[in-house]
Amino acid sequence: ILSNKRAKATIEWFVKRGISNQRISGRGYGESQLVNQCSDNVKCSEEEHKINRRSEFIVLSIK
């Protein structure tokens, strides 16, 4: 749920800055695509957990 909210907020950020929502898509992956070992019940610092709370962008074309 949180990752989907983050994806939606990211899209809204781009739309507010003039990018058409027709040109953007987003998806939340929850804990299925972590960049480190910090999943539930794994002892990690808050900074390590923050690394997984991210938005990534793939630019397909530039006009």
Image (tube, grey):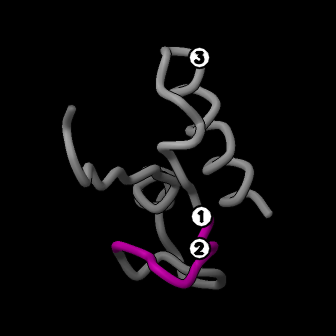
x 57%, y 42%: residue: 22
Name the side, left or right, on which 53 lies relative to 51: right
Query: Residue 49: where, in percent of width, then height?
Result: 50, 60
x 49%, y 15%: residue: 17
Closer to the camera in the image, 38 or 58: 58
Quadrant in the picture for the C terminus: top left
Residue 33 sits inside the magenta stretch = yes
Q: Amino acid at mark 2?
A: Tyr
Q: Amino acid at mark 1?
A: Arg
x 29%, y 55%: residue: 58
x 63%, y 73%: residue: 30
Q: What secondary structure is the stretch in magenta mostly built from?
A: loop
> Which image quadrant is residue 3 in?
bottom right
- Mark 1 crowd level (few <14, some 14–19, many ≥20, 10 Å Cα): few
The residue indicated by pointer 3 is: 16
Relative to residue 60, is residue 16 depicted above or below?
above
Specify the segment rendered in magenta: 28-35
Could you tell me how far apart the alpha carbons at marks 3 and 1 are, in whole angstroms? 19 Å
Residue 34 sits inside the magenta stretch = yes
- Look at the numbered disc 2 and give the secondary structure of its residue: loop
Name the side, left or right, on which 5 lies relative to 12: right
Relative to residue 10, is residue 4 depicted above or below?
below
- Look at the numbered disc 1 and give the secondary structure of its residue: loop
| Disc number for residue 29 | 2
| Disc number for residue 12 | none
- N-terminal of the pair, mark 2 or mark 3, is 3
Closer to the camera in the image, 18 or 11: 18
The residue indicated by pointer 1 is: 27
Q: Which residue, as the protein is rendered here, is positioned at the far left?
A: 62
